Amino acid sequence: MKIEQIYTGCLAQGAYYIESNGEVAIIDPLREVTPYIERAKTDHAKIKYIFETHFHADFVSGHVTLSKETGAPIIYGPNAETRFEATIAKDGQVFKLGAITITVLHTPGHTMESCVYLLKDANGKDHAIFSGDTLFLGDVGRPDLAQKAGGITEADLAGFLFDSLRNKIMPLADDVIVYPAHGAGSACGKNLSKDTVDTLGNQKRTNYALRENMTKEEFIKEVTDGLLPPPKYFPLNVKMNKEGYDDIDVVLERGTQALAPEAFEATANQTEAIVLDVRHQSDFAKGHIPRSIFIGLDGGFAPWVGALIADVKQPILLVAEEGREKEAITRLSRVGFDHTLGYLKGGFEAWKKAAKEYDTVSSIPASVFKKALEKERVPVFDVRKTGEFLSEHVLNAKHTALDHLNDHLTEFPEKDTFYLHCAGGYRSIIAASILKNRGIHNLIDIQGGFKAIKAANIEVSNNGCPTTL
């Protein structure tokens, strides 16, 4: 028996490759499926099953393409309805894989079709659970993504989740291994651990949601308390996972069109495509196409694209470091953004050589910002998350979280210069690009963000109680 967790940090997502006696099961595959197929070939094995723990909201699964390429059935739990052929398993149904078995445990709560898959070894002993978004390490799945108007409520879902955990998961032995679908950084929970594998026994001891003496009412309150609104692209990804999508090869062929500056500019004007610059933030600050949006590949790329661009049907034109165009298109497709129309041939340098107009972001070291503060009180805007801001912030700074920047546009000065920062410099340049796109140019970015601000001994608020909001 072989179990491999294939973890993608940008999405904080875990897919699983399970092999026994030449038969393979894939759980929650990523959009690009070639690595699974090639791995099975290397193992001289055949992909027999594709298991989905639920309809994912935060990424587009590779289930449809993988089934098409291998002939393996797609398996969902009870209540699932799809536009493509799938096996809708019953609660307790057993699937044989080589010398081992995988049992479906229906665990509604995160969504109504959510399932946990219990793997039993060749001796019939419970070995591991693939817990999807039902059980994370340190947390459980948010119960607000499958609400229906006039029907199922957030509290209803939380109650179902309580029952699922108590009746299906907690009775299992402490030595059962837990393989979740997500880790820290995912928007599918509130307080996920950075660890990606644990024992169920340790989770029973440390996970607040698995307290033995917890009442259902307490569980509902604690699980729903402090939930932020889900990113706007979530329901669009669910729709794609239910109904199907273009193969990744089609998306890549469409997106990898190299466009010279003139053609790039003409395409942008004709299609109303967003120009998305995915280079490093310092390169974007030094020069970029006017009105382009920065979301760098080397940060939390895909989730920020989903949160800030939101509409997966939005046409996109890329400005990327040479050689990273395909990577950008692939990572966009993971969260459903399939309409990349091409990229700037030769990168930003080609744009400059063509004598095209370009813009910059004013950016200064924290030491220069400190001198400005010593002269007068200057407007400072902090685009970090709520919890980060509440923990510590520059005195008199205003909080304008990047996730909801468009809600704060009227708060920025119309003419006076203001300063902008995040934690380390990535998010503040995203914010700067959005503000400049909206016609707000009187901003200065603080290089290195709050980390550099503290290092420069700039006065900040007293340490608050850190929060996961």
Image: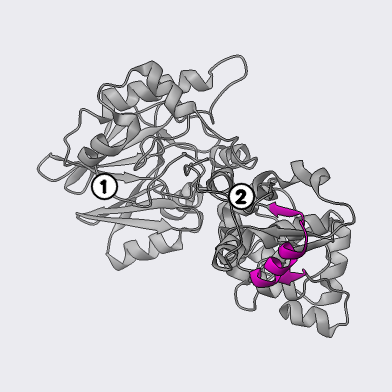
For this rendering, which residue is in front, 160 or 15?
160
What amino acid does circle 1 point to?
Asp
Number of marks in picture: 2
Q: Is residue 109 above or below residue 275?
A: above
Q: CA distance from mark 1 to mark 2?
A: 30 Å
Amino acid type assigned to the residue bearing label 2 in the image:
Gly
Residue at point 66%, 61% (across, down)? 295
Residue marked by disc 1: 198
Q: Which numbered disc covers residue 346?
A: none
Question: Quarter of the image containing the N terminus?
Answer: bottom left
Labels 1 and 2: the sequence-earlier one: 1
Residue 371 in magenta stretch: yes
Question: Looking at the image, do the residues carrying marks 1 and 2 touch, with CB atoms under 8 Å apart?
Answer: no
Q: Secondary structure at mark 2?
A: loop
| Residue that sits furthest to the left in the current view | 123
Number of other residues with Cα within 10 Å of mark 2, as a class: few under 14, some 14 to 19, many 20 or more = many
Q: Nearer the viewer, residue 121 or 353?
A: 353
Q: Indicate the quadrant where residue 446 lies.
A: bottom right
Would residue 184 appear left or right of 298 to someone viewing this image?
left
Q: Is residue 404 magenta?
A: no
Q: Residue at x 65, y 68 (%)?
A: 366
> Residue 29's spot in the image, x, y percent?
43, 51
Q: In terms of image quadrants, where is residue 90? A: top left
Residue 286 pos. (x, y %): 74, 76
Give x and y (percent) for residue 324.
Answer: 60, 73
- Within 10 Å of the Cα at label 1, are there few (<14), some (14-19), or many (20+) other Cα atoms? some
Question: Is 399 positioned to the left or the right of 114 in the image?
Answer: right
**Which residues fall within the magenta stretch?**
361-381
Left or right, 190 with reference to 362: left
Pointer 2: what residue?
A: 336
